[in-house]
Amino acid sequence: MTPSLDKILQCMQYTHEHILMPNIQDDYARSQSHTMLNLFRYARQLAEHEARMLWEENRQIEQLLARVATYLASLPESSARDDLVAELGTPLPAPDDGYPGIAYLNACSHLLKQRLEDALGFLVAFPAELKKNETYQDIRRAIREFLVDNIQREDVLMTASFTSKRR
Amino acid sequence: MTMAGTNSQAEATDLNLPLMQQYFREKHSDSKLQVTALTKFPRGVSRETWFIDYIRGDGTQVNQIIRRNLPTDIGGICVSTLRQEFEIYHRLSRSQVPIAAAHWYEDDARWLCGGGEFYIRDRIEGHFDIPHFFDPAPEYDELRIAVSQEHMRKLALVHTCDWRALGLGDLFDVPNGVEDCARVAIANILRDLEKVKVQPMPLIHEVTEWLHDRAPAARRISFLKGTNGYGEEVFRGREIVALSDWELASIGDPTYDFAHLQDFIPNIVRNGEQIWGLEQALIYYESCSGIHIDPAAVAYYGVMRAFGMLMYGSSGAYALEHNANVQSRFAWNATDVTHMGKLVVASAIGLLPPIDPARLDAMR
């Protein structure tokens, strides 16, 4: 499609910033226009990077969860552990219409992060003595590394977007 | 006369003057009462605020505020209820805490104009802004310290009020003892997050574990204001005549309020000497309240506050998910604010290096 989404957003942002904003007199409307200018930039960042970011991140979580599942499988059996291992082992659903678009990638991201949240919740609840186990600590370290990657990935978008007065 | 109907942004659910006149006449059993102005304050993401002026049949001029739920089903960006906000104002009006008296709560559909429930409270004349407070010139040091001390005195009143006798304990989860305050604060955030969470956040488990492992014991259990400081309190001259914005009020460790405090502890250094800052403010506060606050515990509750930012951000995302026809601030909360919450929390618990304070300042 030409012009691309980014070009359209750039044109809208330019109009907002250089034609509309200088003529807004009302303080509150001006304040909202500042927020919108930042959001325009963010929308452009999403248009450019969201799909690849989600795709890369989903692969990273899948690999991490496979590691977590292996560790969990080595623990003594319990219904909570078994439920979690089953949850982590469930294959991701295929896209409804066969097309792995943004909505599908986002749905997978949601599902994978929910699994990670459930797994971390399970691990955090371990008694203090069990938390000293070396493998346990390796797994926690790997999860923390993912969390840092996740925040830093988002940070690239945020620092490129939220660059002017917010309100 | 200002009417909501003349506002270009008037909505179908806006309050209207004729109905409000009828309403106030019934409430006051005063058939001669005349509403002279009804104006919607065009800001705010948590509640609607309306200014109403009326003259009673006996000639008394009354200026009040109508605080109203937004049309969104969580009542705005804040997950605490409007009813709770009303009860706080209403119950505190029997204490020494300076506050606008709240009179009644309305949930009768006849008066809601198809919008949210509301309550009525007095309008206190004054200003949120203090001229020159942010001016770093030495001639304003005395002003800045005086304002800070005034705020400490008023926080002391909040923290030493008899919250049990005032019935405030009925409104909040109450810690089982001084060692239970942090746990309740964590539980409050998790409870509120659960109401508005629209996406998984594994980071929450890391933060809660960190907070539980390091929870300090409080010196006492107090009623807490939550958000406080610049922009939240009403001044007349150098005096705080009304404390407002109780959306994050709770019962717990008074230290928490110092983590929520906005700008009213200026850092002032002259000729290499620290003449005002957290240490001096805490000493002054202790002289007013008798409560010792440990600066290390303030830092701990700073992490708790950042954790709370995740809840605020999530409520923005929740509002957008349920109805994207909302103002841009919700999207800002859902993106920039949420991300900053993650950065601050991750930095505080050691996952990331410290954040450049300039980034936080840029969000103001």
Image (spheres, rainbow, N blue to C red):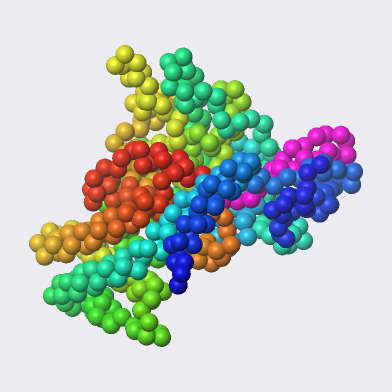
Seen from the viewer's position, the closer of residues B220 and B99 is B99
Residue A43 location in percent, x, y? 44, 59
Q: Provide residue B99's location: percent of width, then percent of height.
A: 61, 36
Q: Does the magenta stretch include residue A46?
A: no
Observer-nearest residue: A161 or B234?
A161
Q: Residue furthest bottom?
A: A97
Residue A81 visible in the displayed image: yes
Q: Which residue is drawn at 74% across and 37% down?
A: B63
Answer above or below: position of A61 versus A18: below
Residue at the extreme left:
A134
Q: Nearer the viewer, residue A10 or A28?
A: A10
The stretch of residues the image draws in magenta is B45-67
Q: Residue at x 46, y 69 (%)?
A: A2
Asked whether B52 falls inside the magenta stretch, the response is yes
Q: Kindly tell me whether residue B96 is visible in this rendering.
A: no
Q: Indicate the position of residue A138 as horizontal and vertical percent values.
A: 13, 62
